[in-house]
Amino acid sequence: MSGCWKMRMLVVCWFVCALFACFVSWVGAASVGIYGVGEEWAGQGEGAVDRVFVVPRADVIREHTAGGREVYLSLNVFGGKEARHHFVDSVPVLASGELLPDRFGGVCPTHAGWRQNRLELLGRWARELGGPGSISGVWLDFIRYPGRWEEPQPDIPDTCYCDRCLALFQQESGVVIPADAGSTAERAGWIRQNAAYQWLMWKKEQISSFVRAARAVLDEGDGERRLKLGAFVVPWRKSDHGGALVALLGQDAADFGAAVDNLSPMVYHRMVGQPVGWVEDISRYYRDMAAGQLWPIIQAEQVPVDEFGAAVAAVSASGADGLLVYAHRFMENGQWGELAGFAPPDNLIANPRFTGADGGAAPGGDEGAAFRPDQWRVGAGGTVIDSRFLFAPESEGGGPAVGIVGGRDRQGSWSVELPACRQGSRYRFTAEFYRNDRLLNSGYPEVRIWGQSHRLNTHRMVGRFQPLFFEVVCPDQVPQREHHFAFVNNNPGVTFWMRHPRLVAHQPVERGGQEVPAQRFFPLGVYGAAADNLPAIKDIGLNSAVVGLDEAHLHACGEQGLHCLVSVPREPERLMVMLERFGGVLQTGDFSFYVNDEPGIHSFPRLQTEDIQRLLKERFPDRFTAMAIVRPQVVSHYRESADYFMLDQYPVPHMPMSWLADSLDEAAESVGGRRLMAVIQAFGGERFAESGWPRLPTFAEMNCLAFLAVIHGSRGLYFYSFPEISRSAEGREDFARVIRRLNSLRSWLALDNEETAIEVRMTSPNRFDPQGRPAVHCASKRQLGTRLLMCANTIGTTVEAAVPVAAGSALQWRDYFGSDRYYVVRDELYSQFAPYEVKVLMENR
């Protein structure tokens, strides 16, 4: 193995296996806990509650551990007023230069004395209360800048601008505040205008660095077992309240998540004026963010029993690993019984951490392969000859992994039995996969679940583990022999690794249809635009271009009168700052937003794409957003992240033209046809040969792809890319010819295709596309009583087809781009098509 991660393939002894088994037991059990338990505990919740948060007193702790409950403490980090009694300079300073009012409480997070005070207290708890029969962990509370978020209209002040913070900011970020910015207010104003992003990121680091320091303190403890570290976090998305979570509170659980074992978003729905369904939404948001386990904490105060039960169910539905309740003193008799309803989803894959050993040598004889995880089998049922099976007890980022070196015997498979599934039910599979090389179009691992094979063609990251996911629907019938999960590698000589496999029942959240802004025009656009080539882009007949978010591009778009699809930062924090800077220009110009580029093959976090979408929609509700997608199966995962999905399959010269059409159809099943656009290949040549595109597409190929996309419902076309297709005179002329044809149909392109599918009858010997369907694809549009018929030959041979026409259509049709006439014979139009030829016919009325 090479790269930054190196697998250690070892023969693992029974001792290590037992250690792993203990760890699985520790992290795998369902958890229900109560916050604020004191001496008044009287056995409430017996059988349902197995975790309690108590005061740091040895006698109270012993009482609960003796009762079989895990005990946790909570450390107030930067909240309250205690620090002010010890350190008069710990009060945060507002941007105006005034001290933060007392009603907020709170401590400046850069105060070294208070930070040390908190870490010393944490260390003392670990030493004195962390042994056997004592606490199991500590949760960090108020791990943020000050603010009052626990109300429908939150009040979050902008802090801290004390002299210490301003000096540290300059020292640690490299930003230099001008000397003539003398007052605190002037320095704060300068930061907002010139270094807002650096300030935001620096504030986040003040919080995250404390979390990492707390982790280090617990790891250095003398206790016989590792104490868990958790964090209570504000239940906001990054995009909520104008980005206040990160910009003002400085809290980013994604940033410090790797340092904690548990995240606990405080989903107090009544306090913040939200419906109970919000509990599930926020819990799901943090489920995707949590590197470890997720234990949301719900409120009991002034919550009716049935509503409390609904909140418990919402946490279960989110996929959370545990549930906490705030607080013991508010619990009513009826609420205790509702806790028994908490049921985190079971992982149907047995032994997902690959523990245990049978002592037998795995086929292939690899070093380290003598270890065989309990319940797992190797091979696909035949004789193993050259496939090899690997095991690593540790992998980069944590946890054991199994690997396969593919062989020509096609026996590369790790498998484990699955329980029966419920017919028609949905399940979600997730795991992390690792590869050292990238074999385009063929080199992918596979997963087999209940007899269904899934090729993981989104696995594109090299040299590190990539999280992958997909949904499975239980088939109508599953033979008993297919009740298993298998990780498969049939690529000879290629090595893949897998870790953390998980298969759980999954009920997608029903949010209703996405409201897409009304489309004012049919975009004909291009990638590769720059301020200096926008005039040429306009001259060739395009009405849109993908540009960067900067002053030069925005000005050039306005100057040329072009609609521009502005590529925004993929990072919510940077986007917040850029929108503050360019918001006025974006409001007045003709702009929409390009929010991501092929997120599926990069496993880009969905929650981050949704944050970007919300930030844009908050300011520009009437502008559309779009993202490019190369694997249509991931569209459902990102359905809330954009208005339009731009399918960008580039088939020339090695893939069929119908690849783009099939991808549009598959994506339409997830989000409907009205939310799709297409990216048309307009590149190729020597620079792209190693990646599989050794030449430019011809006019016929570009024209076929463009019209095929329209036939399959595309609401806009963007070509990739203008600089590449313009490198040669032939390429530029072919491109211009395609655009002229599309522009001549501009009034038609914006119309919906007629819903009735056109069943083409092929009459030539060459008649099928690679999927066995008619080679000619057709669709029709209608306006002002006249029909337009568009047909494209998807294969590289001459064909003939009979195209049915709708009842009541004219008997004579004409070629839209020429003078040929076509006549209806027995309700069909007959036509020959050259390779990849497109024909557009209009009724002659």
Image (tube, rainbow, N blue to C red):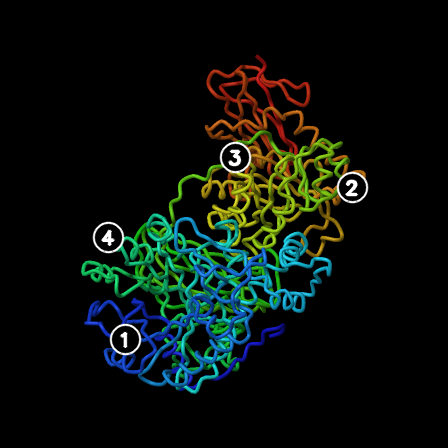
Q: Mark 1 or mark 2, which is nearer the start of the sequence? A: 1
- The answer to whether residue 457 of the structure is visible from this angle is no
Q: From the viewer's perspective, is the residue at label 4 or at label 3 nearer?
A: 4
Determine whether the residue tagged by mark 2 lies in a helix, strand or loop. loop
Q: Quadrant of the N terminus?
A: bottom right
Q: Distance between the residues labelled 3 and 1?
A: 53 Å
Q: Quadrant of the C terminus?
A: top right
Q: Where is residue 769 in the image (x, y as percent from the top left)?
A: 55, 40
Contact (Cβ within 8 Å) of mark 4 with mark 3: no
Left or right of 449: which side holds 553? right
- Identify the residue under disc 4: 304
Q: Mark 2 or mark 3, which is nearer the start of the sequence? A: 3
Q: From the viewer's perspective, is the residue at label 1 or at label 4 nearer?
A: 4
- Identify the residue under disc 2: 532
Contact (Cβ within 8 Å) of mark 4 with mark 2: no
Circle 1: residue type: Arg
- Identify the residue under disc 3: 517
Q: How far apart are marks 4 and 2 (CA)?
A: 64 Å
Q: Where is residue 265 in the image (x, y as percent from the top left)?
A: 40, 60
Q: Position of residue 381 (x, y in %)?
A: 41, 68
Q: Mark 4 or mark 1, which is nearer the start of the sequence? A: 1
Circle 3: residue type: Pro
Label 2 neighbour load within 10 Å: few <14, some 14-19, many 20+: few
Determine whether the residue tagged by mark 3 lies in a helix, strand or loop. loop
Give the answer, above or below, for where 501 lies relative to 421: below
